[in-house]
């Protein structure tokens, strides 16, 4: 138990010193998130969302459900969000550091990213304007293309996505 406590205190210090999150107690659960990276003609697809009173930008995808594999999760999430079929090309990154959820301070997040390619055209409109929606009650989202040569960690909201954004910029520009 001392080893776990020491590890947790160390992580609290690291997270607090980097300004990412401040953790006061151990997480009670874990959530696994699976995201797709669609790079098309020197652009990358981003999702802008409004949930729980918060506006944020992230990569398309979402939460793994019990009994579901990572690939199945991403294909389902993509179909739900964009009404588009995708092929998963290859694994890009899996979280290798401790991160608390922005929506639940008692939950740890593991995010898995895959490069994807479209099989068909999305039914939902894709814009180039950030937050191209009117905020209503509940949740809403829109999708936009960002030019890779202008893309940076400033285009996404969450710490894991920011790291992935840097990796994408380094690899594809």
Image (cartoon, rainbow, N blue to C red):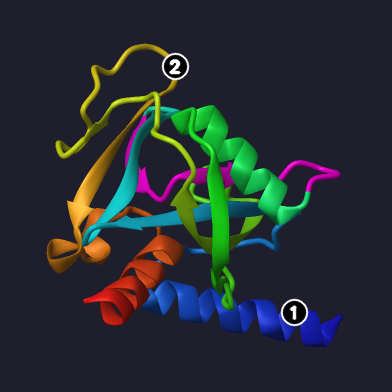
Residue extending farthest to the top is 137
Element class at badge 2: loop
Q: Residue at x 23, y 46 (%)?
A: 145
Label for residue 154?
none
Q: Residue at x 36, y 25 (%)?
A: 124
Q: Which residue is mark 2?
A: 138
Q: Report x, y in % for residue 157.
A: 33, 53
Tally the numbered discs: 2
Would you say residue 56 sits in the magenta stretch? Answer: yes
Whether residue 62 appears in this view of the structure is yes
Q: Is residue 78 left or right of residue 157?
A: right
Element class at badge 1: helix
Residue extending farthest to the front is 119
Label for residue 5?
1
Q: Is residue 140 left or right of residue 126?
A: right
Over which residues does the magenta segment extend? 54-68
Q: Residue at x 55, y 29 (%)?
A: 80
Task: Give the camera-side residue of 115 and 143.
Answer: 115
Q: Is residue 65 left or right of residue 54?
A: right
Q: Residues within 10 Å of mark 1 (few under 14, many from 20)?
A: few
Q: Report x, y in % for residue 41.
A: 23, 58
Q: Residue at x 49, y 28 (%)?
A: 83
Q: Report x, y in % for residue 129.
A: 14, 36
């Amino acid at each position: 138990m001392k080893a776990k406590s020491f590890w947790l205190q160390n992580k609290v210090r690291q997270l607090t010193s980097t300004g990412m999150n401040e953790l006061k107690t151990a997480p009670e659960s874990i959530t696994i998130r699976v995201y797709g990276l669609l790079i098309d003609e020197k652009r990358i697809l981003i999702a802008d969302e409004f949930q729980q009173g918060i506006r944020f930008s992230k990569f398309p995808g979402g939460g793994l459900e019990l009994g579901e594999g990572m690939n199945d999760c991403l294909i389902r999430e993509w179909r739900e969000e964009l009404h588009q079929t995708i092929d998963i090309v290859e694994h890009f990154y899996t979280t290798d550091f401790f991160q608390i959820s922005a929506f639940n301070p008692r939950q740890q997040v593991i995010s898995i990213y895959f490069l994807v390619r479209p099989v068909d055209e999305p039914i939902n409109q894709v814009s180039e304007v950030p937050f191209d929606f009117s905020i209503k009650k509940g949740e809403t989202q829109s999708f936009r293309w960002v030019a890779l040569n202008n893309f940076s960690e400033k285009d996404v909201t969450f710490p894991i996505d920011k790291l992935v954004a840097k990796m994408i910029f380094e690899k594809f520009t």
